[in-house]
Amino acid sequence: MRRRATVSKPSVLFVCIHNAGRSQMAAGYLQHLAGDRIDVLSAGSAPAASINPVAVAAMAEEGIDIAAEQPKILTTDAVKGSDVVITMGCGDTCPFYPGKRYEDWVLDDPAGQGIDAVRPIRDEIRRRVEALVAELAPAV
């Protein structure tokens, strides 16, 4: 009897400085688009006290609720446990481990911006997350 190989699902960690805007929007999109096919984490090198309310509003326009999320501190365990680490403006504060796939997404920071400025950031994040899902967990 042949056994089916067990394929573990990929894990993606989104990191920005405050874990209040870009990384939270990216995590929200990835969770929404990939469902349980990809493990999703987000963290910040210097987490804010709360999620950016304009980022929450921008995602709500897409039908994605990130209001209950809380900024989290970046840990080495989160990086070690992730297959893909996507940084968004955290510079040298993100730990680097060999064997991990790293991407740096250069995106404007939504902090202090109005909804009209945040929408294009949100839309670019969605485009990149859609490409990531297609690569890591294509629909069967």
Image (cartoon, helix red, strand yellow):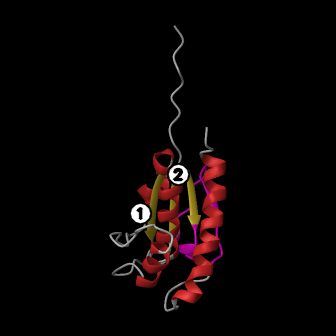
Q: Which residue is mark 2?
A: 34
Q: Position of residue 27 (x, y in %)?
A: 48, 63
**How many residues crowd mark 2 within 10 Å: few (<14), some (14–19), many (20+)?**
many
Q: Which residue is mark 1?
A: 75
The magenta span reads 87-107
Q: Tell me the SS state at disc 1.
A: loop
Q: In this figure, what is the number of numbered marks? A: 2
Look at the picture and state if 27 lies above or below 133. Answer: below
Look at the picture and state if 120 lies above or below 127. Answer: below
Three-letter code for the amino acid on which mark 1 is drawn: Thr
Which image quadrant is residue 122 in?
Answer: bottom right
Q: Position of residue 50 (x, y in %)?
A: 35, 80
Q: Position of residue 22 (x, y in %)?
A: 52, 74
Q: Would residue 55 be counted in the magenta stretch? A: no
Q: Residue at x 45, y 46 (%)?
A: 36
Relative to 73, is 58 on the left or the right?
Answer: right
- Label whose residue precedes the other's in the sequence (1 or 2): 2
